[in-house]
């Protein structure tokens, strides 16, 4: 990318709509409610022939530094300082407010290039607000409609004029065409049934952090990064968008996604919270490894178990993180209790890795990352067909399949059809008659004998071909 642009303005002027327009995807949550965006979200933007990094920010408001609005303002100011150019968005339909005047003064003091954008200029009666924008003293406003895509050519020309053609086009190359986002990736391996190579420990890893509200997800990511990148605080439900951050751990690129806290479905009534939860579900669906953050002071709530079950049903590699370990009075006794509850309450993920951590102090984070890597290795594991069929013969001798209606079931052949997660196909007689209890026996045997703890395992049954079937039909 050649340069970085921050979108700033007061709440509900259309900053996230403009962000989505420039990145070409509905990444940021958009709603009529003011103050939807809270964290700063980066994206790869394309505007005619310009390629640049765009940062969506929270609406700037006058508030004390300790309040939620004040912390949101600090995040926005950090984005302005990071960017080469600011797009100052005002609402041409509503007109200027004292907050707009204050923000204009703040941007002027920064001394960085600013492009004044008059959004919603397609609305009837917007001319008054457009001409009022001249009084800000930040140059001629650019009339646009982020909702309908009007005025984008004028916006492009204004950006080039503000930063100069050298910066605008200096580093433009073909790499800008490769937009990578968590939601664009199909689940790797779903279509490739060939034998995969050995585990690649240099490939970037996508990790989603999920959990109940106020479990400490954003604080955990900030501790990994070593900076206050994400908005945090004592209030529950601060995070709304699924925000991605990248960092290196022992030479490997980790793309980590912070998500909104997920409450019980019956309690999610507001439209905005439904959008946030839907965004978190998308992050789970297209992640590789998912870290479920538990509050160690109140672990294993019903919602915690439902989130783990959801992650496993989606086929993702899962790791449990018992956060706020610095608040635990008797760590050894609680650790033994958590291990027992994990085995008892999560039988569908036998052997799932669980790590006590503290996002506040940094305790256990290296161990958590190592468990994430180890779980991803298991999730990508491939087993040769020869080993699987020798194993299948052995387990049938130890525990033969049951007889159904007086006829013995026969499991004849087994192979692994895919990884991510590991999935196996067994050719057998009467696949519809194989009981669930025997499939659980096979699944637990695979976990134990091939060292595949904690990841979802799929077993599909299909009827073996009968070579005499056609002859019987001819008779």
Image (cartoon, helix red, strand yellow):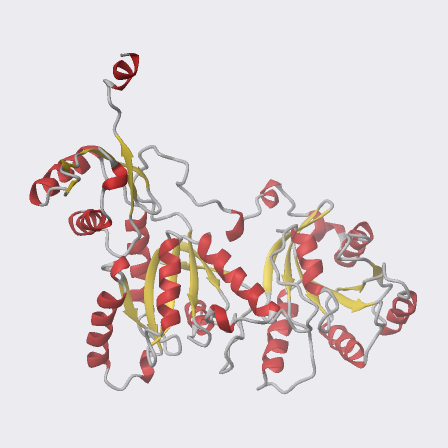
Please indicate whether residue 48 sits to the left or right of residue 291 in the image.
right
| Quadrant that contains the C terminus | top left
Between 72 and 161, the residue placed more toward the observer is 72
Q: Nearer the viewer, residue 323 or 398?
A: 398
Residue 448 x/y as whole percent = 17, 52
Report the residue at 64% width, 77% height from top: 73
- Residue 350 seen by the camera: yes
Horizontal relation, residue 330 to residue 116: left or right: left
Q: Residue 175 sits in which quadrant?
A: top right
Question: Number of labelled discs?
Answer: 0
Q: In the rendered image, which quarter is residue 56 located in?
A: bottom right
- Expressed as whole percent of the image width and height from the top left, the position of residue 180 reads 54, 48
> Residue lying farthest top?
475
Asked if 166 appears above or below 108 in the picture, the reply is above
Q: Quadrant of residue 11?
A: bottom right
Q: Position of residue 128 (x, y in %)?
A: 92, 69
User: What residue lies at 24% left-to-right and 55% top-to-bottom?
Assistant: 453
Q: Is residue 243 visible?
A: no
In the rendered image, the vertical position of residue 255 relative to residue 35, given as above or below: above
Does residue 350 appear left or right of residue 30 in this picture?
left
Residue 372 shown left or right of residue 128 in the figure: left
Q: Residue 327, position in %: x, y?
A: 33, 84
Q: Name the residue at the left extreme.
A: 398
């Amino acid at each position: 990318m050649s340069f970085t642009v921050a979108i700033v303005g007061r709440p509900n002027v259309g900053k996230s709509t403009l962000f989505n327009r420039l990145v070409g995807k509905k990444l940021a949550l958009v709603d009529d409610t003011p103050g939807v965006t809270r964290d700063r979200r980066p994206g790869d933007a394309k505007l005619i022939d310009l390629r640049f990094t765009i940062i969506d920010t929270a609406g700037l408001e006058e508030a004390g530094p300790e309040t939620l609005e004040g912390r949101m303002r600090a995040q926005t100011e950090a984005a302005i300082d990071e960017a080469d150019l600011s797009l100052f968005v005002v609402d041409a339909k509503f007109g200027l407010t004292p907050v707009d005047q204050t923000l204009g003064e703040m941007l002027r003091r920064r001394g960085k290039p600013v492009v004044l954008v008059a959004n919603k200029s397609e609305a009837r009666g917007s001319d008054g607000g457009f001409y009022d924008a001249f009084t800000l003293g930040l140059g001629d406003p650019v009339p646009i409609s982020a909702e309908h895509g009007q005025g984008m050519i004028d916006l492009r020309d204004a950006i080039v004029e503000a930063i100069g053609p050298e910066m605008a086009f200096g580093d433009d190359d073909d790499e800008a065409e490769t937009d990578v986002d968590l939601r664009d990736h199909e689940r790797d391996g779903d279509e490739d049934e060939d034998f995969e190579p050995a585990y690649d420990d240099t490939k970037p890893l996508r990790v989603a952090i999920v959990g109940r509200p106020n479990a400490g997800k954003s604080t955990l990511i900030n501790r990994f990064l070593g900076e206050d990148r994400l908005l945090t605080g004592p209030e529950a439900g601060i995070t709304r968008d699924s925000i991605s951050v990248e960092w290196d751990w022992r030479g490997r690129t980790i793309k980590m996604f912070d998500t909104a806290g997920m409450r019980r479905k019956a309690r999610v009534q507001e439209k905005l919270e439904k959008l946030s939860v839907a965004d978190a579900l998308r992050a789970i669906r297209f992640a590789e490894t998912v870290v479920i953050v538990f509050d160690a002071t109140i672990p294993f709530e019903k919602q915690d178990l439902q989130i783990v079950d959801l992650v496993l049903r989606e086929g993702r590699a899962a790791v449990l993180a018992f956060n706020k370990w610095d608040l635990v009075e008797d760590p050894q006794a609680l650790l033994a209790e958590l291990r027992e509850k994990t085995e008892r309450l999560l039988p569908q993920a036998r052997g799932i890795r669980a790590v006590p951590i503290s996002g506040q102090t940094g305790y256990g984070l290296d161990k958590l990352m190592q468990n994430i890597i180890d779980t991803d290795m298991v999730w990508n594991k491939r087993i040769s067909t020869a080993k699987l069929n020798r194993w299948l013969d052995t387990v049938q001798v130890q525990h033969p399949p049951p007889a159904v209606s007086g006829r013995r079931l026969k499991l004849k052949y087994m192979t692994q059809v895919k990884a991510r997660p590991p999935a196996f196909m067994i050719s057998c007689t009467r696949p519809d008659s194989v009981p669930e209890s025997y499939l659980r026996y096979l699944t637990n045997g695979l976990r134990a004998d091939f060292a595949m703890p904690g990841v979802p395992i799929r077993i599909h049954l299909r009827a073996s071909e009968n070579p005499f079937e056609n002859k019987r039909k001819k008779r």
